[in-house]
Image (spheres, helix red, strand yellow):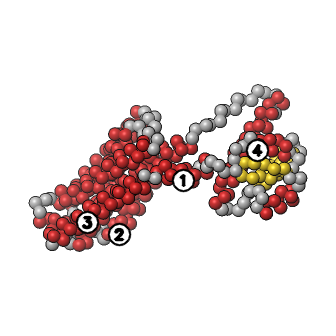
Amino acid sequence: MLARRELRSLADEKTIVLALLIQLFVAAFSSFLVVGLVSMYQPGSVAGVTVDAAVTGDASEGLLATLGDQSGMRGEYYGSTDAAMDAFDRGDVEVVFEAQHAADGRIQVLTTVPDANVQTTVVVVEVRKALRAYERAERADRVEFLSNDPLALPNQSTSSPYFGFSYTVLVPLLLLLPAFIGGSVTVDSLTEEIDRGTLELLRVAPLSPAAIVEGKLLASVLLAPAQAALWMALLTFNGTPVANLPTLLALTTAFALAVSALGAAVSLLSPDRRAAQFLYSTGVLGLFGAATLLPGSPANTIARLAIDSADATVYATVGGYLLLGGGAYLGVRVLVERVDMGALS
């Protein structure tokens, strides 16, 4: 029994190491992954894409001039709407603009884009950029006809989409994912001991039930900040510096402690492995979804720390999360004392 126990523990350790190596291998291609994910997050950031547009109508001159200044769109004039739609149906153009002067002096633009497909997303993004530029140009041309001076137009944003995606999506994901995985590992570790009947063997050792559960829990918790530190090191190596790294790792540890404590509690209350994993996953998703509604949500807190934009409120929120993790840990200790470990095994 002891030999099989040692072999199974060794196999579990090899599995964890293999999982880390696979994730590090994937992280080696993080630059390519970031480009692909940013393309999904903001399709307009994809470089080298040119959308061919057919422009028709009696107000097409100004729109054609605007399209000529757009890097992602190329406009061509068509004498009639039927001719433009024929070109659209043949696939010669991806979008049709019909610009007409309205009776009230306004310009109305009717736009036709392809049906829902992969290309439609990029086309719609480029169309939106072109129409915004056209509106801005028309407003600027008609300033002299206004009776009152309008407010100055704000400067166009020139920030990189990679900045917003990296710090608001990628960094929180890489810091929270190890914590969630750690909780799942805790559930598997405890329910497997109960399912195979080896929990009784552990109780023979000079260890209290609390010490057994703590060992399972802390093994998963300590793995989370180590893995998160590797992710942050790879991001920094790829040109995405992350500020306040010690605070972020402490935050990851707090989340890992909280969700691992949740996993341990679920395993003790529902020893069946499948049921425990379902309850754990549902509980974590529900809690995290509810937390995103808070001003100090985990993702928002991590993003502000990562870009070094944290104030006293953010650090107070971090302290609250640390207390939450500690409280969850103490709650599991109390639960272990009340659960009959002999009945579980």
Q: Quadrant of the N terminus?
A: bottom left
Q: Pick whichever of labels 1 and 3 is earlier in the sequence.
A: 3
Q: Between 54 and 157, which is closer to the camera in this rendering?
A: 54
Q: Which mark is residue 67?
A: 4
Query: How far is the residue under mark 1 from the one under mark 4?
Result: 27 Å
Q: Pick whichever of labels 4 and 2 is earlier in the sequence.
A: 4
Give amino acid for label 1: Gly
Query: How far is the residue under mark 1 from the one under mark 2?
Result: 36 Å
Query: How far is the residue under mark 2 from the one under mark 3?
Result: 24 Å
Residue shown at 84% from the left, 46% from the top: 60
Give amino acid for label 3: Ala
Percent x, y of residue 169: 49, 48
Residue shown at 54% from the left, 53% from the top: 36
> Which residue, given by chain and number where applicable, does mark 2 sit on?
275
The answer to whether residue 183 shows anywhere in this view is no
Decide if residue 51 is on the left or right side of residue 43. Answer: right
